[in-house]
Image (tube, grey):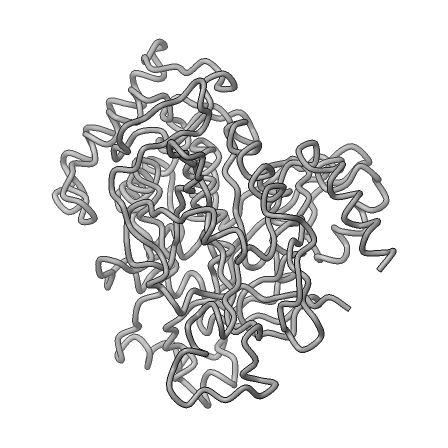
Amino acid sequence: MVQQVGFVNNANRAFGVSQQNPVINNNQNIVQKSSYEKGSLLPYNVANLVPIKTRLETPEEQNMYSQIVSLIQTSKENSISPNDNVSVTQKLDTLLRNGKLLSSSSNDNSTTLKNLYDILTLPRCYGLDNVKILAQTIDALYDPTVITQNFGDIPNNIKNQILSSDDIAQGVKVNPELMDVEGSGTCVAASVEFHMANKHPAEFARWVSGLTSQNKEVEQKVRLDALSKFKMDAVAFLNIFEAKQKDFNFDYTTLSLKPDDGAYIRAQVQDKHWDKGERSIVDVLMQSTLMQLGSQGSYDSLTDIRGGKFSTNPQGLVETEKTFIESVVENNEKMSIRYQKVDDNQNLVGWECDFNKIQKHIIDTLNTGEDVIIGYVLTNETSGKTKKAGYVNTVDNAPNKIINGHEITIVGYKTDNNGKVTFICNDTDDDKSELIEYSADFLIPKIHHAAYPVAMIQDDMALIEAQQMAA
């Protein structure tokens, strides 16, 4: 039986080469970018890009924009972003000029501007500051690479206040060190968060507006055929994932998506004690919500521990959970291809597809304007462990033993004169607010799974499933 592999964090961060100005080639015949500029749209296919709106045309739009600018400028604390010392108003102007600000690609057709305006003018939940939330949302939309899964510490005096609460789990009270999260398991959630900021700015801002509001939730209207072409299977998925539904019919359902209570504690900590390189308030609440959705409501943000049906690993999310999350967020059915064969002892024993087929799946999807979130694994051999002095070839130390899994997002690619492909990627756990490059030769053999729109890979998926059944 092929085992599910949990995807937690990248303990071997040095395996990539960082490059601040890659040559992006997301479609060789259409897009040629010589550099990646902060605030620009990340790689996209011009042929499939809907017309963008870059001018404030209505009195309502002009009023919302001017009020946001005015209130940001009067807030000394948030007028200059601590991430890069660029003014928030300058970033807002960039979002207007590149089309992100007036994008209405959201679940309820609201624009990014309208959702930012709501963040600023409507009450936020207790302990959160409107202007700070607005500034952090603009930061993430301007440069999605600032999104991170690095938790940050909880000061001792705050930790003591948390422990005195009656609502805290007994296990945390007995072992407060559980709150000292170092290598977090939110790589799947952080990658999806990055994708939303990168490709769906209006939806990203809508989620932030809802999750930081006094209602502490965002409503997501999801078509049943976005979960499965078979409606009864879609109903089963909703039940299995224990999704909280507000209404239901056999065309769509409306989900109530919320962070766990511990996320608001961590959000309040980050509101007062954020350090550069740590998760923002927005990161905390977005990642908790996605972790809750994937883990059947079992995630605890204080400890970064989850339960649920699909994984015995207390951290991270597995492939099945990731695919469900992506389908809900995109409101479009995603299908995950598991490329690697893994035995019951978590040894990598082969591949379901050849190299060229995997590369084609990724490039074809990138050429439609989509990102591709992949899960890769490292074995004892590929991590370099077998090369270390004292290595013993036992069952647990076998060269192909999987020792780590992580999720990253492929946003583009480039091809050299010899036809060799290099992928442009974002990693939420590499301590860098910039894109990184991996050669296809290096990355593809490590890819365990990737999810794509069904139409992109359904024929190949059917062939793989048939081969698996025959074996």
Q: Is residue 131 above or below residue 294?
A: above
Expressed as whole percent of the image width and height from the top left, the position of residue 110 reads 49, 26
Name the image quarter holding the C terminus. bottom right
Count of all numbered marks drawn on residues in the image: 0
At a point 32% along the width and 23% down the height, the residue shown is: 64
In the rendered image, residue 5, in percent from the top left (x then y), is placed at 62, 66
Nearest to the observer: residue 28 or residue 137? 28
Q: What is the quadrant of residue 338 in the picture?
A: bottom right
In the image: residue 307, left or right of residue 433: right
Q: Name which quarter of the figure residue 30 lies in.
A: top left
Image quadrant where one finds the N terminus? bottom right
Left or right of residue 69: residue 287: right
Residue 38: horizontal and vertical position, in percent?
25, 35
Give the left or right position of residue 31, taking residue 314 as reference: left
Q: Nearer the viewer, residue 35 or 341?
A: 341
Q: Position of residue 41 (x, y in %)?
A: 36, 29
Q: Residue at x 47, y 50 (%)?
A: 441
Relative side of 275 to 287, left or right: left
Residue 295 occupies quadrant: bottom right
Residue located 40% across and 45% down the image? 425
Q: Residue furthest top?
A: 57
Residue that sits furthest to the front in the current view: 418
Q: Nearer the viewer, residue 464 or 224?
A: 464
